[in-house]
Image (cartoon, rainbow, N blue to C red):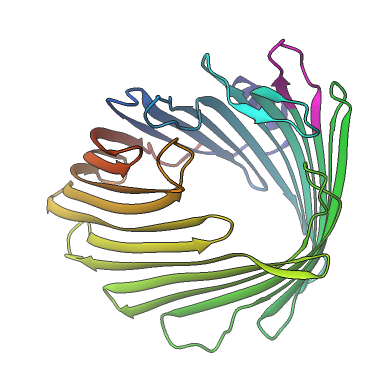
Amino acid sequence: MRISIFLFVLLLPALALAVSVDGWMNVQTGGDSLSPQMGRLDLGGLLKGGNWSLVVHQRFSHEDSTGIVPRILNSYSRTDIDFLIEAGPVSINPDVCWTVDIGDKKPEIVLPGEAGIAYRDGFIRPGLGIEADVSEEIHLFARGLYWNRDLKQEDDYDLAWTETRLIGGVTWDSPWGTSLTVAGLNHKTSSDFIDYEATWSRMDVRVAVQPQSLPVNMFVSGDVTYSAYDGSDFLDHDIADRLTSRVRLMQMVIPSVSVNATFESVIDFDDGITRSACTSAESRIVYRFMRSRDITSAIVVFGKLSRSSIRTERAGVFSRINLYRGLSFLFDAEAHVTPTSVTGAGPDRKRYVFGPGFEYQFGNTARIWGIIEQERTNLEKNQNWWRFRAGLEFYPGYFNI
């Protein structure tokens, strides 16, 4: 946060006198008998001039783990600073991300080349992007990223782990509702301490289609991407070429009901062998009612199914029913099927989460909510427990200086 303010003070005289200011805050907390200290805080701000903008986002997240339900440790502080300046058809976008893992227990990372395990303390990642419109149909883009990761072994030796990524390409928007993108990517990873260095590259050819002559209140888009890889992964295996296909459909059936569905298929071509890497289907149905009130009531039914080397399934319903002015009743219910590594639990874990709650909205300025949930899951034996989640969202508004 201090870095962003200092940067803005240096750049302000060279930019513009009129500045627009925006900001937001989102606080979430909760816990149960297994994890009593879960929570997240998001703070954000936007400064915008005539041809430039500066966005700062700060997140503090904490999630612990227990012996009953092991979780990935997720306690960290993350600062994102994104600066954009536009000069005619050219835009320049420097940014930086700084992440620090906090807490006594650090996330573990398995190192390549049988080098053992390291502990993650965070990373800093500056980047620079440049885009240019050559004409109404042709768009050029390039981006460079650099990671300096703070990885240490048990003896506290720093691994000097760095990564570099360069991306560049061109997009042609045809007059027939299709676009063609050709892009290249090169990624290099190195660690002097364990004498490791790996480089891989990729060429992407992407065709996207968005039909224009569709029925009213319907949107359909699709894209196909072929990625040709050159290089190997951390296990020293050649990376397979990949064909990714995606179709998205949005339809307003009637003014109060809308449907959103996405279908995706990923096929790998590995040394003459063709195999399905992943298939997934996701759908969401939204029903809105009591629309004459300031807060519209809604019921959302959703589901997702994916098949790859693992199987995941998710289905649920969420409802918000307005009671009086800003007060609304909440209810959510979800069912999950995911892999698990808990000893004795079997290859898959089934979870069922449901519970009621309340929400109050103060116009467009603030929102406060809380929900009590029960979770049932099959580990070594069936387990169930209660937990509480709550949040506060605050948006002070947009003003000019």
Placement of 163 over or under 9, stated as above or below: below
Foreground residue among 13 and 181? 181
Which quarter of the picture shows residue 391? top left
Q: Nearer the viewer, residue 342 or 16?
A: 342
Q: Is residue 299 left or right of residue 162?
A: left
| Residue 42, percent from left and from top | 45, 32
Image position, residue 4 (x, y; %): 63, 27
Instruction: In the displayed orientation, state which residue is furthest to the left.
Output: 324
Q: Position of residue 69 (x, y in %)?
A: 39, 32
| Residue 98 seen in the figure | no
Residue 269 appears in the picture as rendered: yes
Residue under the point 65% across and 25% down: 122
Magenta residue span: 149-162
| Left or right of 8, for residue 354 | left
Relative placement, left or right, of 340 versus 168 is left
Q: Quadrant of residue 33?
A: top left
| Viewer-closest of 19 and 43 | 43
Task: Assess whether residue 130 is covered by the magenta stretch.
Answer: no
Left or right: residue 246 versus residue 86 is left
What residue is shown at x 51% (from left), y 16% (from top)? 103
